[in-house]
Amino acid sequence: MTAEYWDGRYSDIGDTNVSWFQPTPENSLMLIERVSEPTAGVADIGGGAGRLVDHLLERGYHDVTVVDLSQQALNTARDRVGQAPVHWVVSDIRDWQPDRTFDVWHDRAAYHFLTDPDDQRRYWAQVRESVPVGGHVIVATFAEDGPEMCSGLPVHRYSAQGLAAAMGEGFTVLETLREEHATPAGGTQSFVWVLAQRT
Ligand SMILES: C[S@@+](CC[C@H](N)C(=O)[O-])C[C@H]1O[C@@H](n2cnc3c(N)ncnc32)[C@H](O)[C@@H]1O
C-alpha cells in the first residue's frame, strides 16, 4: 500500500466515483456532534478527499486535521474547501507522530487496511497517546459480512465486538452501529461502527 497507489485510485476513478464516496457522511456527523462541540480538535484519519471536512466546517468546527497518505486526495479536498482553516497532513498513519492531542479521533475505512497485527497494535497505541482521557474515538470498518477487499487491497473485517477488542485497554465502548453503505456503482457494503470514550 503506497501513496502512489492511492493517488492513482483517486485520479483514475474520481473522488465522487470511488466506492466509499458519501455526499453526506451521516453516521460520522451524528456521532461527532453527539460527543463534541465545534471548538473540538477533530482528527480525520485517512480522510482522503471525503466530504466530512466540508460538513464539519459548515457546522462551525474550526480545528479539523485531515491525515492521508494520498497528496492527490488532500489536494482535491483542499481545492474544494478553499482557504478554510484545516490542517492537512500527508502521512502514512503508521508513521504519523502528531505533536498535539485530539478531542475526537475519526476513522472511516482506513484502519481496516491495517492487516498486520503489529500495525494494528501500534495504531491503537497511537490513539491512546493522541486522545486524552475523556476524548472520543469513532472508527468504521467493513463488517464481517462486508467485502474482503477495498479498492483492490485486502482488509481486516470486524464485528463490533472484534473491533472493540482490537482497541485494547483504555477505551469504553459507548455505541456500536451497522450500516449498509450504498456505493456510487449501485452496490452495498456492510460497515460496523464503534464509538468509544478514552478512559
Ligand atoms: C476507503 S478510503 C476512505 C476515505 C474517507 N475516510 C472516506 O470515508 O471518504 C481509505 C483512505 O485511507 C487512505 N489510507 C489508506 N491507508 C492509509 C495509511 N496507511 N495511512 C494514511 N492513509 C491511508 C487512502 O488514501 C484513502 O483516502
Image (spheres, rainbow, N blue to C red):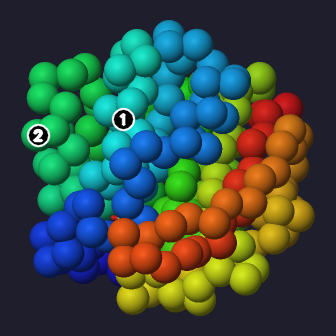
Q: Position of residue 56 (x, y in %)?
A: 42, 27
The answer to which image quadrant residue 69 occupies is bottom left
Q: Position of residue 193 (x, y in %)?
A: 71, 55
**Quadrant of the rendering where the N terminus is positioned:** bottom left
Tell me which residue sits at (67%, 60%) in the image.
179
> Is residue 84 visible to the viewer in this orientation of the structure?
yes
Tell me which residue sits at (59%, 89%) in the image.
148
Which quarter of the frame holds ligand 1?
Answer: bottom left
Q: Looking at the image, is mark 2 or mark 1 earlier in the sequence? A: 1
| Disc 1: residue Cβ within 8 A of ligand 1's nearest atom | no
Tell me which residue sits at (78%, 34%) in the image.
198
Q: Position of residue 147 (x, y in %)?
A: 59, 85
- Number of other residues with Cα within 10 Å of mark 2, as a class: few under 14, some 14 to 19, many 20 or more: few
- Say what secondary structure mark 1 lies in: helix
Q: Is residue 39 above or below residue 102?
A: above
Q: Is residue 172 left or right of residue 45?
A: right
Residue that numbered label 2 is attached to: 79
> Is residue 95 visible to the viewer in this orientation of the structure?
no
Q: Position of residue 58 (x, y in %)?
A: 35, 20
Q: Is residue 129 above or below residue 193?
A: above
Q: Is residue 34 above or below residue 75?
A: above
Q: Give the amino acid type for the residue marked by disc 2 in the picture.
A: Asp
Task: Give the label on residue 53, or none.
Answer: 1
| Disc 2: residue Cβ within 8 A of ligand 1's nearest atom | no
**Quadrant of the rendering where the C terminus is positioned:** top right
Tell me which residue sits at (55%, 42%) in the image.
26
- Say what secondary structure mark 2 lies in: helix
Q: CA distance from mark 2 to mark 1?
A: 12 Å
Q: Which residue is nearer to you in this view: 27 or 154?
A: 27
Q: Give the amino acid type for the residue marked by disc 1 in the picture.
A: Val
